[in-house]
Amino acid sequence: MRFPNVRSALLLSALAAVQPTSAEEAMLSSTSLNSCQLNSQFTASLFNVVYTPHNNSAAINVVATSSIQGYVSFDVSVVAYGYQIIKQSVDPCKLGLAGLCPMTAGNIPLKFNLEVDPSAKDQIPGIAYTFPDLDATVRVVLNDTKTHESLACVEADVSNGKTVNLLAVKWTLAIIAGLVLCSSAVLNGLGHSNAAAHIASGALSLFGFFQAQAILGMMSVHLPPVVQSWTQDFQWTMGIINVNFLEDIFTWYQRATGGTPSTIFDSLTTVSVQVEKRGLSVLPDAALNVYRRSASLLPRAASALSKRGNITTGSGSYIVYGIQRVAFRADIESTNLFLTGLVFYCLLVVFTIGGVAAFKGYCELAAKKKWMKSDTFLEFRNGWLTILKGILFRLTLIGYPQMTILCLWEFTQVDSPAEVVLAIFFLVGMTVTLGWAAFKVVRIARRSVAMHRNPAYILFSDPHALNKWGFLYVQFRASAYYFVIPVLGYTFVKSLFIAFAQGKGNVQAIGLLLIEAGALIAASVLRPWMDKSTNSFNISICAVNFINSIFLLIFSDIFDQPALVNGVIGLILFFLNAIFATVLLIMVIVSTTLVFYRKNPDGRYQFMADDRTSFMKSQSQLTGTTELDALAATARGDKGGYYKPGLDLDDDNESISSESMRRQTGAARLSIPTGLDNQGHHQNQRRSLIDPSVPLFPASGSSSRSPSPYGPPTTGAFRAQNNSTPTGFRAQNNASPWQRGAGYDH
């Protein structure tokens, strides 16, 4: 049969389902029919329709349930990006549709191909077939022809099969982020610590922005299709990666530990899945119809039902939103999502350990076979266990947002008792580990301030502390060593809102707005990162995250704005974040590439104002002294070089380091005059571990240096009584440990 009405053909052709068609073939499709009215007397558990303009046909597969009897008319409207482009009344009797004229109560299975008038395709703009993630909806209201009473309302979202959710984009982003992080590690191993710190800081900030994009997609606020697909490109940063055989293992594990896996993908041939994008006002009604069998319900009841498993409507179809929406779009059962993220994080840790160990073995073999110079990667080879520990700490920091959200969300799902235990173990373990590391950094910095009036001294002069704890503070200026604590608090509070407020879009939107506003203000006022360019890089990320939170507040419909506003804001969010992410990628790639083309990579970056480069051992500053340092270490009996053996959580004395400092203390004690020893009252005074012969002190006895902001020195009186000048002290103690063995004691 043929459509006599061109507009009717357009309307029905816009209702389409994904069928096995060519990717280049133009089509319009829909996979679910959603209820848009309370007490709707017409519902569909299965709705698959596809329109292909090249053969002017629409394939329809519908399983509907109707309690309507008699003759009805259809008020059909087509809305694109919130703008209504078509509205028309259609009489099914004139179309000759069996079962709809008149309508009868009961199940109505419809599966047929419908021939569409060729002129219909001319009325559809060509961009409708090409623009990715089309935001278009067809709504049909069924009215009684006699009383004109609205009996039912259904709507279907339209797609053209084009999307920005592309596998190639995910692989590209992952490879770039991985290469940049590896580049910073290589530079650090070669001794270019200044360049490595800048590159690592940029890579971590970029990865954090990717995670923020993924978190946007986990919000239960309704999102336009293009925003859903865009955020899906970054879900790999949260460990949400679909591997079929692993999903089978996760399902088996869940059953074996007392859980009940969801089977949403097994029922797609008979049940539709509604990907929520317009709001949660319809969701509570549909959900409670299953459990309460009532005509209406309150939003609070729906949010309580959404805490476990997939929500079903009264027609039997599923509704997914928030974290469940992310799982569905990734082709992962929602009950497998926690294990998926957990296992991929663990795999990342295992492969990293294996990679570091393999690289250590290769370096030793290459040095033995003389494939490379014996001093290449010498610092890494001598202290690779400490460096590995620092890498594992950094992986803990990178994976903290992912695991915090998934573990907290698992508490609301309880997929199985064993998974809840895993969630508790990883959440508590990672939180305590990072908290302990932050505590250690604060103690080391305070010890450095007490002894040397500068937090950078021990934080950056001790290679053991730098390689082990540096992941928490190296991206910040020395005086902002504490800033990792607000960062961890920001991550944890944000995760609480994402995990526990699923189904409460307004709460999530307002909470995220306040959190991002606080982060932006703190970053702009404190400017804690290492230099001006790094501060600008991170503040711009905070600004975009704040703008995104404003957009999410608009999507929550808290302002009751027209649907057109949501459609336009969705496009703005996509283009803003796509352009910004591209700019960040280009900046990181160019910066990393230029470093490798410079003879002195550290020279590309200006020295930080906190004088960390005065304490850090940089290859560009100590070129040619490696062998002398090794000889000096041998003469002093330091068999392990800068590192001590053992992979332990050492105490402060060991962290601060170092046998060299202990030797300085011992030398200072040997140089104390005998008279003071007999008096005894100087014996118990705290002595600074710094050697006065280090060029941090003036050459004369007068103090021309400005007072330290960290307080007055504690050893001035003692030095005044025993040494009139630093030169006299040097004469008694020979050259300082910083100079011995490096050619300065001649």
Image (cartoon, rainbow, N blue to C red):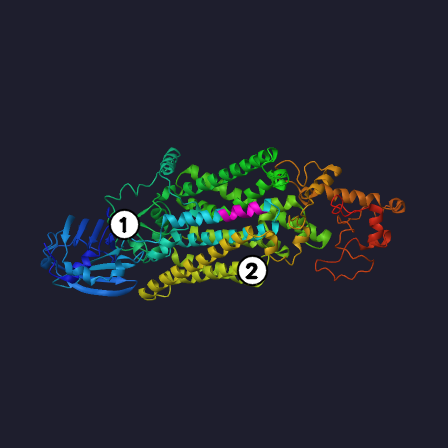
Which residue is pictured at 62% across the width and 49% down the height?
441
In the rendered structure, the answer to whether residue 308 lies left or right of residue 76 reads: right
What residue type is disc 1 on? Answer: Ala
Q: Position of residue 469 (x, y in %)?
A: 60, 46
In the rendered structure, the answer to whether residue 502 lies left or right of residue 693 reads: left
Q: Is residue 704 magenta?
A: no
Q: Above or below — where is 288 with respect to 148?
A: above
**Residue 713: in sight, yes or no?**
yes
In the rendered structure, the answer to whether residue 741 lies left or right of residue 347 reads: right
**Tag of residue 412:** none
Region rendered in magenta:
179-187
The quadrant where residue 708 appears? bottom right
Which quadrant does the N terminus fall into? bottom left
Q: Position of residue 312 (x, y in %)?
A: 29, 48
Which of 585 and 741 lies nearest the eye of the viewer?
741
Residue of label 1: 23
The quadrant where residue 697 appears? bottom right
Q: Position of residue 613 (x, y in %)?
A: 66, 53
Residue of label 2: 533
Which residue is pictured at 42% across the width and 40% down the height?
339
Q: Residues within 10 Å of mark 2 (few under 14, many from 20)?
A: few
For marks 2 and 1, the one nearer the N-term is 1
Magenta span: chief secondary structure: helix
What residue type is disc 2 on? Answer: Ser
Mark 2–mark 1 Cα distance, whole angstroms, equals 44 Å
Which residue is pictured at 68% across the width and 39% down the height?
641
Q: Residues within 10 Å of mark 1 (few under 14, many from 20)?
A: few
**Residue 405: in sight, yes or no?**
no
**Tag 2's secondary structure?**
helix
